[in-house]
């Protein structure tokens, strides 16, 4: 006999205009409130887990700076070639 999944509910308060606009967009995109909010929660939690320490954040920043520098060098080379 299969067991029923445990569930809990989250309730939030929004003004009627926001709710109507949200429901309108959901309808246009063929999505549900539950689906969108579950995806938001999963994305939010995965962000928290992906960078869990200041050292990891510093490494991400260092790597991003390296990429930005490389892109800048390549852009400068491309501009030089265009001028020539």
Image: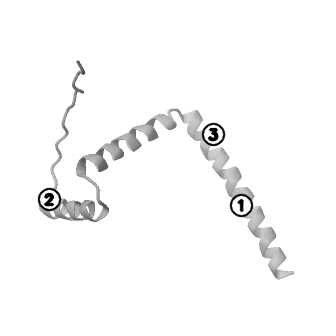
Residue 43 as seen in the image, left or right of residue 54: left
Residue at figure coordinates x 25%, y 52% from the top left: 32
Q: Nearer the viewer, residue 82 or 33?
A: 33
Residue at figure coordinates x 46%, y 34% from the top left: 49
- Distance CA(mark 3)–CA(mark 1): 18 Å
Please provide percent x and percent y for residue 17: 15, 64
Q: Which label number is shown at residue 37?
A: none
Residue at figure coordinates x 24%, y 51% from the top left: 33
Q: Which label number is shown at residue 15?
A: 2
- Which residue in the rendered view is the most extreme toward the front? 1
Locate residue 59: give its quadrant.
top right
Vertical relation: 8 (above or below) 66 = above
Helix or strand or loop: what does disc 1 sit on? helix
Count of numbered circles in the view: 3
- Which residue in the rendered view is the most extreme toward the right? 84
Q: Which label number is shown at residue 71?
A: 1
Q: Do the numbered discs 3 and 1 sit on residues whose CB atoms are within 8 Å?
A: no
Residue at figure coordinates x 58%, y 35% from the top left: 56
Please provide percent x and percent y for residue 12: 17, 46
Q: Nearer the viewer, residue 24 or 68?
A: 24
Q: Which residue is mark 3?
A: 59
Q: Residues within 10 Å of mark 3 (few under 14, many from 20)?
A: few
- Which residue in the rendered view is the most extreme toward the top? 1
């Amino acid at each position: 006999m299969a067991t029923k999944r445990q569930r809990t509910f989250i309730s939030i308060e929004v003004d009627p205009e926001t709710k109507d606009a949200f429901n309108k967009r959901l309808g246009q995109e063929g999505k549900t409130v539950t689906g969108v909010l579950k995806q938001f929660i999963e994305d939010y939690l995965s962000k928290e887990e992906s960078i869990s320490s200041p050292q990891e954040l510093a490494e991400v920043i260092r790597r991003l700076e390296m990429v930005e520098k490389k892109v800048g060098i390549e852009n400068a080379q491309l501009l030089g070639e265009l001028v020539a």
